Amino acid sequence: MTDISTRAVDSQQDNLSWSVIGAYGLPTVGVGYMYLLINLYIMKFSTDVLLIAPAVMGTIFGVSRVWDAVSDPLVGYMSDKTRHPLGRRRLWLLISIVPVAGTFIMVFSPPGELSGYQLIAWMAVGVIGFYSAMTIFIVPHMSLGAELTLNYHERSRLYGLRHASYTIGSIVALVSMQLLINAEQESEAAVRLTAFELSVLAALVTAGLITYAVVKLRERPDFQGRFNASPFGAFRDVWQNPHAKLVLVVSFIEHIGSAVIGLLTLYVAQYVVGAPGLAPAIILAYMIPSSASVPMWIPLSRKFGKIRLWMFSMVLTGLSFGGMFSLPFIDSLDGRIYTIFLLAFFAGLAAGCGGTIAPSVQSDIIDYDEYKSGERKEGSYFAAFNFVFKSAAGVMIFITGYVLQFSGFVPNQEQTFVVQIAIVGLYGLLPLVCYVIGAIMFSRFTLDESEHVRIRDALRSRA
């Protein structure tokens, strides 16, 4: 009877209106656009248009990952400690607007007269500054989601719509990437002009959406001032939280598998499938179901539970990408195209589930920390989760480069069977192994709905 009454109280107090969910999710349309365009095109823009050596750009991205080890925990800690009439999180969202917009324009708008070390310095400041500015936005924004509702299932609805918004922005970025590729056929000046116009438009739209979120959303005033740990103490608490430790390890394994997907889709389309022009369509076949399936996963999480559903998404993702290993063994071009589109569709479905459920589960873990410590340190937790994601991506960039080099990869030529196997081994077998291991480990996770209800009931009793 206690569980039923507790769920009723939570449902009444923490149901969110669609206007609040929309205000929270809309900024990620711009953020998703910026992130994907940077990840997919900035390397090509730098090497082919600006004529910067690939190794130099690789070094810049490597330095940005090292800096993340400092910036993510720092922003998380400072966000938790903030006391301001605007709130702990919205103040940081407001602060992020100018650096996010400015650095995104900067990386796509280097002055034409710059060259050599000056141009490299410009791009280094722009790239590292962009990822730092995004940390200022993303960590407080994810933290704000955990505060907007304490309801176990309402969090899935909130983060599910956030994931859908982010994916919609990524889809628009694919269109912009195609416009930039088309401009390359005209002239360097055409690429620079297109890049500048797109970056300014994206910066203005994103700034407007973040401002709307700051104005529309409200924070819980009782959460301010409930954080007294030192920086090291805060992250010690994160690591000593048994639920957080398990999810951090599982997330790192997951992201090791998923990071290679973004890195190698263009290689698979060109060198394995033999249809490089279909790469954007393959990515769309992944992204559209990832966004469109969110309304399906939210009621399913209520019926089957978030833990079971997240495990299912891990297994489905692993099997979908594991199937990619068969591509070099399919003789016909049509067969390879059909196979990769079908598998990309199911992988996208699974991604929609993971993007909906994962941050919801992470928010429940923060409630457990409050139960143990009496503090609210969402920023420290989401900084840790964000850093794990970035670290996994950095590890895979390093591994992928060496695997391609030592397998005998030669750019812009037909690849040997050995190279194709190396590519699909990274693209298919590695995610399969990682996601299956992650699902097995996550089966030990015990913070289910009934346990979360017990924790929230105990916290209300204390209050």
Image: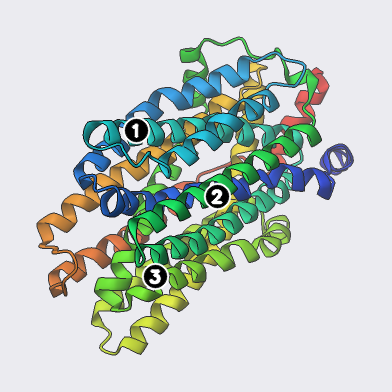
Asked whether the viewer can see residue 252, the reply is: yes
Please tell me whether mark 1 sits on a helix, a strand or a loop.
Answer: helix
Instruction: Return the residue nearer the eye: 76 or 36.
Output: 36
Residue visible at 36% across and 42% down in the picture: 392
Q: Measured from the top left, where is residue 430 in percent x and y?
A: 30, 58
Q: Which residue is mark 1?
A: 122
Q: Which residue is mark 2?
A: 32
Q: Which residue is mark 3?
A: 279
Amino acid type for the residue under numbered disc 3: Ala
Please tell me whether mark 3 sits on a helix, a strand or a loop.
Answer: helix
Q: Quadrant of the C terminus?
A: top right
Q: Disc 3, disc 1: CB below 8 Å?
A: no
Near mark 2 (Cα within 10 A), the count class, few <14, some 14-19 or many ≥20, is many
Question: Looking at the image, is 348 positioned above or below residue 198?
Answer: below
Q: Measured from the top left, where is residue 305 in percent x and y?
A: 66, 54
Residue visible at 51% across and 25% down in the picture: 238
Amino acid type for the residue under numbered disc 2: Gly
| Lower sequence index among marks 2 and 1 | 2
Amino acid type for the residue under numbered disc 1: Trp
Cα distance, mark 3 to mark 1? 30 Å
Q: Measured from the top left, where is residue 267 in percent x and y?
A: 28, 65
301 left or right of 325? right
Quadrant of the rendered structure where residue 143 is?
Answer: top right
